[in-house]
Amino acid sequence: MRIGLFGGSFDPPHEGHFHVSRVALRRLALDRLWWLATPGNPLKQTAGLQPLKQRIAAAQKIARDPRIVVTGIEAEIGARYTADTLRYLRRHCPGVRFVWIMGADNLLQFDRWRDWQEIVRTTPIAVVDRPGATFRAISAKAAQRFAGARRREEDAARLADARPPAFVFLHGPRVAQSSTALRSARRG
């Protein structure tokens, strides 16, 4: 089983999340993609964050593909950081080949994530292009540190089978929507 993991607050979920998921499912030849709705992001202010159950319900309406599963597993297992979630999943899902999915905008600050180098060394990563991040993302600290682990985009369908560290940068049509902008509009 090849499963993509796409973490985020999903506050609110939007068509950009669905777009990234469809790109990942197709280009990475994944069997499933799990949206990991986080209880809170340690790098972002969580004041005003909608309740997790509400965000999961809204995400399920956006995730209109039977291969996409919306989950609140991080709250269930008490994980606060991605590295903890990945350790848990590797222990409890032997034989599953996981791929971490992130937008290029997240790659810009990936080196600020707890145990980010462990994440890169243990889990293949697919970076999906996002508006405004295309050129900056590839020069990000994490991308530079693991530049030798970058795979050709044409080989993306084999990423789940790659021995980490391995990452691919996926280009293509982009959706400009962002949860940050939607929250600002909701408050405004």
Image: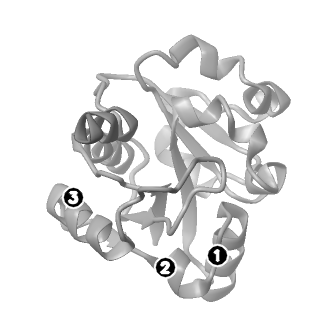
Between the residue at mark 2 and the residue at mark 1, the CA separation in whole angstroms equals: 8 Å
In the rendered image, residue 170, in percent from the top left (x then y), is placed at: 47, 30
The quarter of the picture where residue 15 lies is top left
Amino acid type shown at disc 1: Ala
In the rendered image, residue 136, in percent from the top left (x then y), is placed at: 62, 15
Instruction: Please name whichever residue, 168 or 52, is drawn nearer the observer in this view of the structure.
Output: 52
Q: Which badge, 2 or 1, is on the more N-terminal residue?
A: 2
The quarter of the picture where residue 80 lies is bottom right
Disc 1 crowd, CA 10 A, few/some/many (<14, 14-19, 20+): some
Q: Which mark is residue 79?
A: 1
Instruction: Please name whichever residue, 186 or 159, is drawn nearer the observer in this view of the structure.
Output: 186
Position of residue 15 relative to residue 80, above or below, is above
In the rendered image, residue 102, in percent from the top left (x then y), is placed at: 52, 43
Q: Residue at x 31, y 24 (%)?
A: 174
Q: Which badge, 1 or 3, is on the more N-terminal residue?
A: 3
Between the residue at mark 1 and the residue at mark 3, the CA separation in whole angstroms equals: 23 Å
Residue occupying the far front of the picture: 188
Q: Which residue is mark 2?
A: 73
Q: Give the mark toward the camera: 1 or 3.
A: 1
Q: Which residue is mark 3?
A: 63
Q: Residue at x 35, y 53 (%)?
A: 11
Secondary structure under tag 1 reads loop
- CB atoms of marks 2 and 1 within 8 Å: yes
Position of residue 144 relative to residue 67, above or below, is above
